[in-house]
Image (spheres, coloured by chain):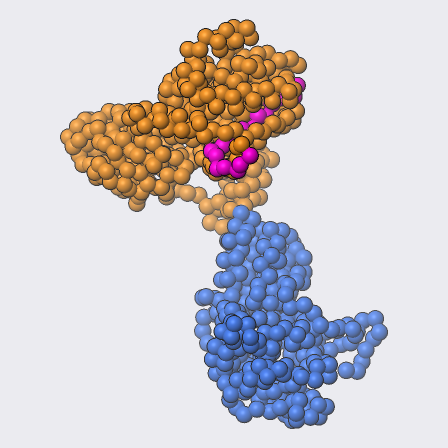
Amino acid sequence: MSASSPEQGRTITYREAVREAIRDALTRDELAFLMGEDVASYGGCFGVSHGLFDEFGPERVRDTPLSESGYVGAGIGAALGGMHPIVEIMTVNFALLALDQIVNNAATLLHMSGGQLNVPIVIRMTTGAGRQLAAQHSHSFEGWFAHVPGLRIVTPGTLEDARGMLWTALQDPDPVLIFEHGGLYGVEGVLADDAGPVDIDVAAVRRAGDDVSLITYGGCLPRTLRAAELLAEDGISAEVLDLRSLRPLDTDAILASVARTHRAVVIDEGWRSGGLPAEVSARIMEGAFYELDAPVARVCAAEVPVPFAQHLEQAAIPRADGIARVARELVRPGG
Amino acid sequence: MPSLGADMDAGRVVAWHVGVGDHVTRGQVVADVDTDKSVIEVEVFATGTVTELLVGEGERVPVGTPLALIADDADAGTAAPSRPGAPSISAPDEGVAPTRGAAAEPETTTSPESAPKPESAPKPPPPATLGGPSPGETPGSRAPISPLARRKAAELGVDLAAVTGTGHDGAVTADDVARAVSARPSFPSVEAPASRAPASRAPAEAAPATTQPLTGAERQAALRRAIAAAMARSKREIPHYYLTTEIDVARAMSWLAGRNSGVPVTARVLPVALLLKATAVALRTTPDLNGFWEDDGFRPGSAIHLGVAIALRGGGLVAPAIHDADRLTLEELMAALRDLVGRARAGRIRGAEMSDPTVTVTSLGDQGVDVVAPVIYPPQVAIVGFGRIRERAWVDGGRVVPRSTVIATLAADHRASDGHRGAIFLAELDRLLQEPEALGKEHENPEWTTREAED
């Protein structure tokens, strides 16, 4: 990573931040290795691991056959054997092929072995829409995985988290799934030179506000921050809460934010029915009912397979103007 | 099946006093219901003819279950009661009048939410149910109010019925409540007058003087404000001191059980009556705890009128007097308590009963509370709190034994008395409860009369 200014840090993309995190892990932890489809000489489907093969060699950066169930299972086996595998799955859509390994093995073995077998695996995968990759590459299933006890689900939505969550996840003795939104890889920003590991436990207020809490994570975070700016132009002060971890959810942070603003919109690129925002909303009802001055609102993906055509795709997923509209209606009904 | 106590989920019909075809008049006792604690008479609150008994004798049914069908008198028109303070029940169309049980819950001097809850009424048009909506809540016409607005309104004493909503679907929001507060000229005065009237605690007294009947919400808000004013005044002005003692009531309880075993259930005396009796008699020893602090001086009460804190359904409480409680027999005191609780919850407390108490007793034992640290009702100078009677570890003759005890707390006004006097009162209370037989006959005890005369 080249251009750097001593005070500000460097301008860097989300993709590069993830790559730096992997490089850091492979450098510092000799038990760590990366494996997945085309992660080695090709440099990863989204270019995340570009150059790492040359740097670390075939033992540490390994290509796998086109079999999610097989190589995720191999990763779990390596983890049981004491290694610290970083397994990359191309997109969450294909993670469904490895669902048995993830849900029935990785998530359960600690429990079923009476605490004898922990599975220190980290599984990274791309999620989300917005890049015209059509339905089979564009869905957001992180909310499904967040249903499963035994898994920890984290969703870096900023450069700092892209750079810092992986190392913390590797230190966790149990399986951690990292969901990287495909639309974020190209996002550029300034990352501090001393950026390093971050916690993966708590939600973060990315923008403070008084009138409404916009609760989101991952790929929807930049759009939600833009929505907060649109709302500010209308004199509405929106707080943006980045969940960061979907399992466990930082319920305290959610309730504290709602207690400040008395209104909440939950934004998610997954489908509305039975989605993660439903869980967030339920926790608000349970824990902050008497703080609410309006019903909790959700902005989610349209309940269709994500379309290929660009205008349809954009219409199907949460966008800044739509988030702002829902929030505005909550704060000033009919206004 | 009416709810006859906060913790009552079901009741058993012990006896019907009426049969099919009988004409019943409002207020008539129609059935006896066993609540597990005691047998209570259920009154009918409508006039009409019994067409069917839905629950047989000996049957146990959940609260809210219709007990009987009563046909409205053809010419009666409105058989449903419209007495303020009592749950009003709209008569269904089929020409049957609803009935509702009302009964005292004598065991508890304080228990919230007795009597029919709105939820206990079955689906909208049942023929006749013993149970019905609370006053001021008309099913189906509930205006949307945000949870926060509801909470703020309760905190600020705002009547939500009078607030115009600007939120979603016309919902009342917290801002609407805030606007209503700033638009309000001022609260109706509820500060207790400095005269004898201890505090305007009765709904009727607390309400602004107006000829318009109050809605349930208004009455509730007014009652809440009155309590707020009295309690704030108490904590602002009265330097409370608190004394607590644990009293062995094993003998008293076993004596009471023996006494109760020989009489019909309706004539039984509940433990709380014994505690009230002992309190009243003990106060003769310490008259400086029985009276009022007024104009920088203590004015003793002319008699011992025991205020009894009674929780109302829908929230709030009143503490009307049992007059001359120390002179009543246990049976009379029990009957007075039963009567008072029933009328308090029906909103039929007489004004004098509200203003007469010279001291107050509150008992939260039925809620599982061990110790009550009560707040004095100004201008009274003392209040006695009783927790629950239960078996606790007790040291007797060097051994730890299980023993029924009650923890009594005296809160008294340090302007009017000192801790030493309070201690004497509690010691006397304890002594009296060790001699339940004497307490049971105490009203005829000349020694007490003499002592009272000396006071």
How many marks on residues? 0
Residue A36 on image: x %, y %: 59, 87
Task: State whether residue A141 appears in this view.
Answer: no
Residue B256 covered by magenta stretch: no
* Of B302 and B153, the residue lying toward us: B302
Task: State whether residue A180 appears in this view.
Answer: yes
Q: Residue furthest front?
A: B398
Q: Is residue B265 above or below residue B137?
A: above
Left or right, B217 with respect to A242, comes to left
Residue B404 on image: x %, y %: 47, 33
Q: Residue furthest left?
A: B21
Left or right, B353 with respect to B62, comes to right
Left or right, A319 with respect to A3, comes to left
The magenta span reads B398-415
Q: Is residue B201 above or below residue B11?
A: above
* Of A289 and B415, the residue lying toward us: B415
Q: Is residue A276 above or below residue B433?
A: below
| Chain corresponding to orange in the figure | B
* Of B337 and A126, the residue lying toward us: B337
Residue A135 on image: x %, y %: 49, 80
Q: Quadrant of residue B418?
A: top right
Residue A316 on image: x %, y %: 50, 72
| Chain corresponding to blue in the figure | A
Name the residue at 51% across, 53% down: A286
